[in-house]
Amino acid sequence: MNVIRKKIDGLSLFAIGLIFIGAFIRYYQYDRLGYWYDELYSITLSSLGFWDMVSELQTETNPPLYQITLWIWIQLFGNAPESGRILSLLLSISFLPIVYLQSKTLLDRYQRVLLLIMCVFSSGFIFYAHETRSYALLVLLSGLSFLSFSKLMRNVQERGNIYLFLLFSILTENTHYFGFLFVHLLWFVYLSQYFLVSYKNSDWKAFAHQTFLYFILGIFFSWEFYKLVYIIPKVDNIDWIPEPDLEIYLHYFSYLFYFFSFKKIPILGILIVLIVLPFVFIVLGKLSIDWRREFQSLVLTLLLTILFLFATYLISLQKPIVTSRNLLVLSLPIYFALSLWFSHSLSVFPKKGFLILIFLLFLLSYLSFSKNFYKGFQKEPWREVVQKAIELSHQSTLYLSFGDHRYWNYYLHDIYQKGEVLELSKSQDACQDLQKDIQKKGIKQVFVFESLWDVSKKYKERTDTQRVCFQQLAKQAKNKEQISFIVMTLWSIEY
């Protein structure tokens, strides 16, 4: 008994250590970069008054739960740059012990540790833990939905978990549209299974009850249904999202497994060998598997994955939506299935040795991912551009932008309190008034902030009055040497 207790305690300590490792690598350098465009949208929207925010959410192309959660967070802790990121960090870190504890009735203790290892070192989970956006919340809620679903599938007539499943499904679908698609596929599979059980037992009253709960799920998404039908189709296609193909899907799976080699160690090759290994043991007669039990977890996960990918592919034929974020909701189901599959090798290899092997493999995957993740500017350096402008500016300074002045003001006005960015006017009269104001106030510097990568292309998209105003301001500065005219983009500074 003492030996068994010692083994359990040792494995539990290992799991606790994994959670601390996961917390550290999520916290490490989380604020090394300032907010980029999408994060600035989130933080400025949730910094509005509540009803102003709700008004904007009515036409926003995402469900409202995250923005409301962020609004509450900002009311409690403020909208400093670190604040929004800390919310995502806490959601991502809390996901680790929650998954470990909630999977207790679904997996044995070794399988739970295998699952935890994959979640700790998941490149997608780490990446979005550093962003003030909805994805950390989406991972948490979709994970809880999947675990509740899995418990129900073990016993479809167990009514205790159905209400938790409904609750987590409502929260998930109102966090992101990928969450909506994911939970409705879960309910499709669940109701299909329940229909077969009801048909076998002639218990149609119980099936009607489950169908009614699904109807409730739809009611809580009714406004978003309206947006999906009447608002989202009118939104222009996002030009950076490519047409769906096999290469794109394989690339985005790197958020599940960052399989690029680390110091010539073939991480993907080792992973494939570990996946194939149980099949080899079965053929050699060294391993037997209860396929009835495995069908429910492995084949069901494969079915969910295929349904989700197929659904996103069909939608993308009309409007491309396939991005790495699609696969975040699939992460836990795939990790869950792999933890079951890998665990079969534990009956052939020494358990501790195999756990260490899996740990080292996913640690190498994280190290490969971190080589580029912590280097340079992979996102738009809004904060750094504003800091540079402050460094170059004098007392008599005017700050302008072609657009997005609300985002520039987040740093310049709200955080650093060094002035206010005005939007470059679209009115010819207003532009002339601005030029007179520059002369009257003795402005010595004019900064124009540009938020797009390709500045020359963006200038072509301006209104005629904006282009004329920009040219007149530049000419005014050129004719009067005492005025400096500085264009600051997210990637360069032009004098």
Image (cartoon, helix red, strand yellow):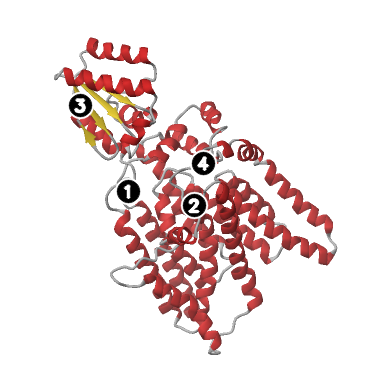
Cα separation, mark 4 vs mark 2, equals: 28 Å
**Mark 4 vs mark 2: which is more N-terminal?**
4
Q: Nearer the viewer, mark 4 or mark 2?
A: 2
Amino acid type at image mark 3: Ser
Q: Secondary structure at mark 1?
A: loop
The picture places residue 272, in percent across and down from the top left corner, at 45, 74
Q: What residue appears at the point 20 percent right and 26 percent down from the top-left corner?
A: 393
Res 105 visible: no
Q: Nearer the viewer, mark 4 or mark 3?
A: 3
**Mark 3 vs mark 2: which is more N-terminal?**
2
Q: What residue appears at the point 32 percent right and 11 percent down from the top-left corner?
A: 433
Amino acid type at image mark 2: Glu
Q: Quadrant of residue 147?
A: bottom right
| Residue 216 vertical placement versus 414 (above, below) | below
Amino acid type at image mark 1: Gln
Cα separation, mark 3 vs mark 1, equals: 26 Å
User: According to the image, label 3 marks what residue?
Assistant: 393
The picture places residue 246, in percent across and down from the top left corner, at 49, 61
Q: Nearer the viewer, mark 1 or mark 4?
A: 1
Residue 378 numbered tag = 1
Q: Secondary structure at mark 2?
A: loop
